[in-house]
Image (cartoon, helix red, strand yellow):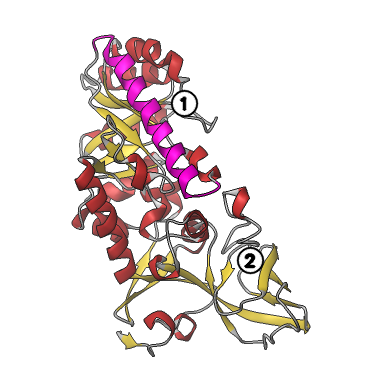
């Protein structure tokens, strides 16, 4: 059923939507515009756009990203890859090592259905993956994870050439590139710092690729992966692929970094005030099972963007604390607190949109101020 909404602030009256709370709402027109912008950036830079689909884990979203110009999707787990393959996505990169005989068997089967690339962060992972594929007289494309400063997974750049050379010699393996999540860029204090961090991460990866190629390996792919840095890193010489995920929807984290505004943020969580026991505090029905407890990732911006989400239509109120089914609101504004009568519906931009998708798993979809669809997320099996 298509239902037209009243045209108010920004053309959307999010809280008037016929959606049970807590509920996730997605403006398809804003999503499309965000996709078109990043596709244009990728094309102008001559790089591939492979959005990280663990952000949404929705077949309809992944299909729409391909339709609008993405060349494939990146995922975090083999279960996600299987679900997107079932939805018709033909090219997938699992950007996390696939470990264990059962998951490797699934990867082998999946590689017979789609253009699949797997990840490694060392020789041991390459040996296990290569042995599985070699036993079936097949070869699998691999990408080597590089630690570009986040300190999570990945090989130290100084050791990458040795690891790459050892992995490339293994049967069943075709080492096609290196990849990173330049998550350290989220610590930027301003735009100049963000661009400098992005360029530094891209340059580090390009130099690492050159060191590997000096060993006689072609290594055609140099892949970067963060929405924070995607706009800048795409233009770094030597980068061939970007894998941002959040950019298509945006969230408070991207607003804090200057990458987005309310008009380019396609997602809202709608919540209802369920308790207002005194003037300075209230509770809503969206807690950690809807919004998560994530704060804005860049600590330098938390004073400007405090709490566990942005209350767009209740300025001065902060989601100060979360329990599973409760958001604890406190008044931090000037003067007397504005009233939040029980039953008031609130428009919230989540701090981290990936968690809102993962927790709510269904989105009411708008286009031109009308409810046009409902998009469902994958079930629990895609988490494996």
State whether residue 111 is above or below residue 231.
above
Q: Which mark is residue 154?
A: 1
Q: Position of residue 220 (x, y in %)?
A: 22, 26
Residue 144 is at least partly visible in this image: no
Residue 126 is at least partly visible in this image: yes
The residue shown at (30%, 12%) is 170
Q: Position of residue 156 (x, y in %)?
A: 48, 20
The residue shown at (63%, 66%) is 287
Q: Secondary structure at mark 2?
A: loop
Which mark's residue is nearer the viewer, 1 or 2?
1
Query: Is residue 298 found left or right of 54 in the rendered image?
Result: right
In the image, is residue 339 part of the stretch drawn in magenta? no
Query: Is residue 40 found left or right of 232 in the rendered image?
Result: left
State whether residue 263 is above or below residue 78.
below
The residue that mark 2 highlights is 287
Classified by dominant secondary structure, the portion drawn in magenta counts as helix
**In the picture, residue 289 is in which quadrant?**
bottom right
In the image, is residue 207 part of the stretch drawn in magenta? yes
Q: Position of residue 78 (x, y in %)?
A: 37, 39
């Amino acid at each position: 059923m298509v239902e037209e909404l009243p045209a108010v602030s920004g053309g959307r009256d999010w809280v008037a939507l016929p959606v049970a709370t807590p509920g996730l709402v997605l403006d398809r027109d804003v999503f499309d515009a965000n996709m078109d912008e990043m596709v244009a950036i990728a094309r102008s830079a001559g790089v591939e756009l492979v959005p990280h689909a663990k952000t949404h884990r929705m077949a309809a979203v992944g299909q729409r990203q391909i339709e609008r110009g993405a060349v494939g999707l990146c995922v975090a787990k083999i279960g996600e890859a299987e679900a997107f393959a079932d939805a018709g996505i033909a090219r997938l990169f699992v950007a996390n090592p696939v470990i264990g005989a059962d998951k490797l068997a699934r990867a082998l089967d999946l590689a017979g259905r789609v253009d699949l690339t797997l990840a490694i962060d060392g020789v041991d992972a390459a040996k296990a993956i290569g042995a599985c594929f070699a036993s079936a007289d097949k070869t699998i494309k691999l990408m080597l994870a590089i630690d570009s400063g986040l300190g999570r997974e990945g090989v130290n750049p100084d050791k990458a050439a040795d690891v790459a050379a050892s992995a490339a010699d293994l049967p069943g393996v075709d080492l096609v590139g290196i990849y990173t999540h330049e998550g350290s860029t989220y610590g930027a204090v301003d735009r100049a710092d963000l661009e400098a961090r992005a360029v530094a991460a891209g340059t580090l990866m390009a130099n690492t690729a050159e060191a590997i190629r000096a060993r006689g390996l072609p290594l055609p792919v140099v892949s970067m992966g963060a929405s924070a840095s995607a706009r800048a890193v795409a233009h770094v010489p030597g980068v061939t692929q970007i894998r941002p995920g959040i950019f298509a929807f945006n969230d408070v984290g991207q607003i804090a970094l200057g990458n987005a505004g309310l008009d380019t943020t396609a997602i809202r969580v709608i919540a209802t005030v369920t308790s207002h026991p005194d003037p300075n505090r209230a509770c809503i029905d969206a807690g950690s099972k809807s919004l998560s407890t994530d704060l804005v990732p860049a600590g330098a911006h938390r004073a400007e963007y405090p709490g566990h989400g942005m209350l767009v239509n209740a300025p001065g109120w902060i989601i100060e604390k979360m329990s599973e089914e409760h958001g604890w609101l406190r008044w931090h504004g000037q003067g007397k607190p504005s009233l939040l009568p029980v039953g008031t519906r609130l428009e919230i931009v989540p701090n981290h949109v990936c968690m809102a998708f993962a927790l709510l798993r269904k989105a009411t979809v708008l286009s031109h101020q009308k409810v046009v669809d409902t998009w469902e997320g994958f079930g629990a099996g895609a988490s494996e």
